Image (cartoon, rainbow, N blue to C red):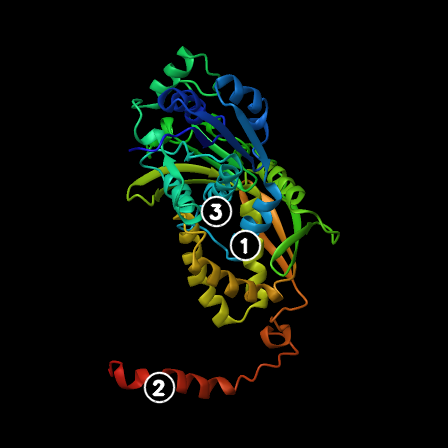
Amino acid sequence: MTQRINKIVLAYSGGLDTSVMIKWLKEKYQAEIIAVAADLGQGKELVNLEEKAINTGASKIYIEDLREDFINEYIFPALAANAIYEGKYLLATSLSRPLIAERLVEIALIEKADALAHGCTGKGNDQVRFETAFYTLAPYLKIIAPARTWEFKSREEEIVYAQKHQIPINVTKKSPYSIDRNLWGVSIECGLLEDPWVEPPKNAYQITISPQEAPDKPEYLEVYFEEGKPVGINEKEKMKGIKLIECLNTIGGKHGIGRVDMVEDRLVGIKSREIYEAPAATILYKAHKELESLVLDRETLYFKEIISQKYSHLIYQGLWFTPLKDSLDAFIKKTQEKVSGKVRLKLYKGVAEVVGRHSENSLYDQKLATYDEGDLFDHKAAEGFIKLWSLPYQKTGKNI
């Protein structure tokens, strides 16, 4: 006999899918719907969210301010790892999913709910991220994914349903983008963007100005780090994570920094075209990576490149709560002990260019690197080094 579902906890954003979903779930299961929205820095999307959820049919809504947790437990570890998926995507949406999933489970236990629900589609990555976390943290809770089974075949049909039932939505047939925004970046898909040949329309972008319309004068910026974590901008006084990232998003967005247009390989096996905006993430990623090049030895840097790629895959594939991820964290934490100092960047017309770096832990020795007077490098030692280095290839190489 199938267990009766009396109470469902829904991951709620107030977007098209989850707005329609409250009413659909309530009708389908005759159950109480509890909405959970995570404040991850999406700003205006949270305005009137409580009123909207209740009016749509939810019995209760939790609006959880998870920004500090998001920064300290997810963003900064990913930054320390230099995690970037397929060389372009800084994983803003991917990073948020395990945090939201964990809070959903906690609230489901508090509310004694029978099931967890999400608004992810059957071809998206997020369904895997949410459900893998659910199964890892609370395998005894039923998982409901309406977007995989309901009658709507397109976003246009959902819009019609919403209009019919007077469900307020912020999307129209003329602007059908699906947008996910948080402190670390914005993910934008659907609509015209589904054609990889079409240039993204101007109205698709949310927080960055076009590089062509950016200021004609470059802006210089200094970012300070302590053990791999950004702690300040343009001054040595510490700046908390939220303020720091918001500040960099504003400055970077003004200069058109952080726009990405890419065709990526989804976890479910298909390719998709999405655009991203990540001004703060782009600036911090470049600055952090450059500071590491100054303070880490060659072999650690080379090996960390391998770890960075694997770490980005774990995030993208929803494998946050895994033993491998914990083990990689231990390695990455060790590498960050000397990553303290400052990096100067020039922001201009969509480009964040590193133009200076300094650290008390620097491995750069100007007396060894210089070609001017004062050079201490032993040039004579190079001859013997090259003979030994090339020795194996004297036997395997071609003798002309």
> Compared with residue 219, is residue 321 higher up or lower down, i.e. above or below?
below
In three-dimensional space, the C-alpha distance between marks 2 and 3, rounded to whole angstroms, equals 43 Å
Q: Residue at x 25, y 83 (%)?
A: 399
Q: Are marks 3 and 1 in contact (CB under 8 Å)?
A: no
Tell me where residue 214 sits by quadrant: top right
Would you name the residue on which mark 1 appears? 77
| Residue 287 on image: x %, y % | 58, 54
Would you name the residue on which mark 3 appears? 90
Say left or right for 293 vs 241.
Answer: left
The amino acid at mark 1 is Pro
Q: Residue at x 44, y 50 (%)?
A: 315
Tell me where residue 270 sits by quadrant: top left
Q: Residue at x 52, y 17 (%)?
A: 55
| Residue 306 on image: x %, y % | 42, 62
Disc on the earlier residue, 3 or 1: 1
The amino acid at mark 2 is Leu
**Number of residue marks:** 3
In three-dimensional space, the C-alpha distance between marks 2 and 1, rounded to whole angstroms, equals 42 Å
Q: Residues within 10 Å of mark 2 (few under 14, many from 20)?
A: few
In the depicted view, which residue is nearer to us: 338 or 32? 32
Of marks 2 and 1, the one in the foreground: 1
In three-dimensional space, the C-alpha distance between marks 3 and 1, rounded to whole angstroms, equals 12 Å
SS for tag 3? loop
Disc on the earlier residue, 2 or 3: 3
- Single out the residue that lies furthest toward the front: 1
Q: Residues within 10 Å of mark 3 (few under 14, many from 20)?
A: many
Would you name the residue on which mark 2 appears? 391
Q: Are marks 2 and 1 in contact (CB under 8 Å)?
A: no
Image quadrant where one finds the N terminus: top left
| Residue 65 on image: x %, y % | 61, 37
Q: Residues within 10 Å of mark 1 (few under 14, many from 20)?
A: some
Disc on the earlier residue, 2 or 1: 1
